[in-house]
Amino acid sequence: MLVGGGTGGHAGPILAIYQNLVKRIPDIEIHVVGVGSGEEKYFFSKLPHYHQIKSGKLHRYFTIKNLSEAVKYAIGIVESFIMIKTIRPKLIFSKGGYTSLPVITAANLLKVPYFLHESDIEMGRTNKIMSRNAKKVFVCFPTEYYSDIDKDKLVWSGPILREDDSTGKSHKSFFGFENEKPIIFLTGGSQGSLALTKALLDIAHKLFPKYNIIHQAGKHSIEVAQKFRDSLDESERKSYHLAEFLDPSGKVDMMWEAIKVADLVITRAGSTIAEIAILGKPMILVPWKYAAQNHQLKNAKYLVENNAAVMIDEKDFTSEKLLQSIIATLTNKPDHTNSHKVIFPTDGAEKICDNIIKEIEDK
């Protein structure tokens, strides 16, 4: 049983593990569990065993909304308990996050073994709770950053990368570009970042003469971006590819392609940065200042220290500073092609699946 969803950052790795396991053991029965979010449909809707449960996102501080979230969480535990009793999985793999907590709570009650994966350099609160009884905890960053987790459980797997079935060539035509201008890719993730979007749109007219732009706006800023696109003349529109979410579920994984064709990626500092680093792409990171335990800032600093990115602190972030950073980065063209060899293993999915297969074969 594979558990994780809600956002693309959780669902994408789950699909990668699913694909890897099916390739190795074609007759394996895998059940995937999520919360039925819009982002999940791109990854899970075509799978034969896709289950949706309730789950609440609980906050440390008291709000009225916390009451309704607690009810969802309780319902999710009951749903998970019944589901696990019915399916009887040999092992559960969790990508973490609030989606996974009801399932892992039920797994603990039923004594079903489970593995976890953590994408950030600072382990999230939910994963810390779940790690107490996990058999193994796979982590994206080196194990010394997780000092409060039992070292015997920790495995440095690196990120879980989606499979890339392409020839390795980049395809600018997927994004409608008919010129050879360098490509800037800005993404705020599946949720989107209004701050990044507004900054980009402020300077876009200065960028269009020299650059193409791929913009994954996300649900929180797609309307603002669409109005901007509608205002462009025909020549500028040919240099601007806008999407709410880059679909990974078709014959072409558009998110992966966007990273591959980009000469520069501008993003927050969540789990996607590992994929970008592994492809050796120059990055401008703007860590979200409200991230739990300030983990995005810590993620970004790790990449900056290893010469894999530049960072703009959100308190200093302006459209003018972004423009200056874009020009400086694309003019200097830093060589990040070997950075992944230092900062991330590239076989995370394989390592995790090796351990999953060994665990279920030993039962």
Image (spheres, rainbow, N blue to C red):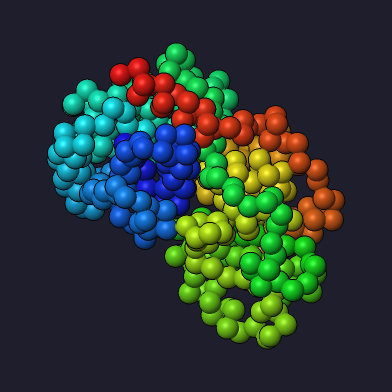
Q: Position of residue 176 (x, y in %)?
A: 66, 73
- Left or right position of 288 against 99: right
Q: Quadrant of residue 309?
A: top right
Q: Nearer the viewer, residue 352 or 102?
A: 352
- Rendered position, 357 above or below 103: above
Q: Nearer the viewer, residue 277 or 295?
A: 277
Identity of the residue drawn at 66% across and 40% down: 278
Q: Is residue 160 visible?
A: yes
Q: Nearer the viewer, residue 104 or 346?
A: 346
- Left or right position of 200 against 87: right
Q: Residue furthest right?
A: 332
- Left or right position of 82 against 329: left
Identity of the residue drawn at 53% across and 77% down: 226
Q: Position of residue 165 (x, y in %)?
A: 59, 49
Q: Residue furthest front?
A: 27
Q: Quadrant of residue 302?
A: top right
- Rendered position, 296 above or below 345: below
Q: Residue furthest top?
A: 152
Count of marks overlaid on the render: 0
Q: Position of residue 198 (x, y in %)?
A: 58, 68
Q: Is residue 59 visible?
A: no
Quarter of the figure with the N terminus = top left
Identity of the residue drawn at 31% across and 50% down: 48
- Left or right position of 113 against 16: left
Q: Quadrant of residue 363?
A: top left
Identity of the residue drawn at 61% across and 34% down: 346
